[in-house]
Amino acid sequence: MKHAGRYKLQINSKWFDFYLVVIVSVTEGDSVTLYSVLTGIKDGYVIRWRFRNTVIAEINKRDDRYTVNDDVLDGRFRDRLKLDNQTGSLTITNITMKHTGDYDLETNFNAFIFLTLTASDIYTTRSSLIRLIVYARLPVPVISSNSSQCSSSSSSSCSLVCSVVNVSHVTLSWYKGNSSLSSISASDLSISLSLPLEVEYQDKNTYSCVLNNPISHQTQHLNITQLCHTCSVHCCGPTEAVIRLVLSALVGVATVILVLYHIRSRRAEGDQAHIHTSGSA
């Protein structure tokens, strides 16, 4: 970050100016320190930190004044700025998406690296540019079955889907071990993403769904046993289980009644036969 700023390049008798922009990426809620190129602020120094052309912090050694303007720009920096009076470095705490943008460090003294210095370079204004990119915290992907009911025992594959909601600048991917199977990306718009996957019921490989942006990632591992099952193994919800239990009980009761009826009928037939034989005698 300390290398950001204006550089001069001399080729033969011609001078070329160019700026080195440092890009800093952070996650929402984190803190970041924007370092100045100064090792110490001497008397006479005036440095200013600007965000979108608005001064948010200033050190004026001439007047011995140190200022943090955290109420500017709708108060997005309120209670978030910490200025180092010795080096001029600026710390932003509890970063939000509103803090994404370009930050300029301005000083009235030359504080950058030049191949050749001339007298006119010494007291002109110099500017250092730092581009801060803030990424939202990533949610954990959700893996679910694509089917609301269990599959028949004759089916050989299981349909799954990995999904996330309200994301931007991310990529959602399915992995088999360490190998990428498929992926889908979101642009700067906040959208929902879903990515399907077909696996065999008896597949013993390791699958995972990964959501990532340039600085972080979230991973959800697939539990095939939990999400992929056939009806013959597991399919009955609480209501269906109760119904099956009641039906089984009714069948059992009916069977007992039929057996008792059969026994009584045989006994009645035996009694009638005995009476008939006694009467004949």
Image (spheres, rainbow, N blue to C red):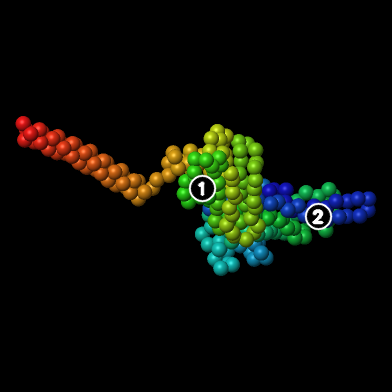
Where does label 1 land, which residue?
Answer: 145
Q: Which residue is at 58% across, 52% downward? A: 194
**Could you say which disc has been placed on residue 201 in the image?**
none
Where does label 2 land, which residue?
Answer: 18
Mark 2, Cα crowd under 10 Å, few <14 / some 14-19 / many 20+, is few
Residue 146 in picture, x, y percent from top left: 53, 50
Q: Inspect this view and state whether residue 127 appears.
A: yes
Q: Inspect this view and state whether residue 68 appears.
A: no
Residue 182 in picture, x, y percent from top left: 65, 45
Nearer to the camera, 157 or 125: 157
Residue 243 in picture, x, y percent from top left: 33, 49
Q: Which residue is at 47% across, 41% downward? A: 230
Q: Which residue is at 67% across, 47% downward? A: 39
Extreme front residue here?
A: 280
Nearer to the camera, 92 or 252: 252
What amino acid is at disc 1? Ser
Name the quadrant of the C terminus: top left
Disc 1 to disc 2, C-alpha distance: 55 Å
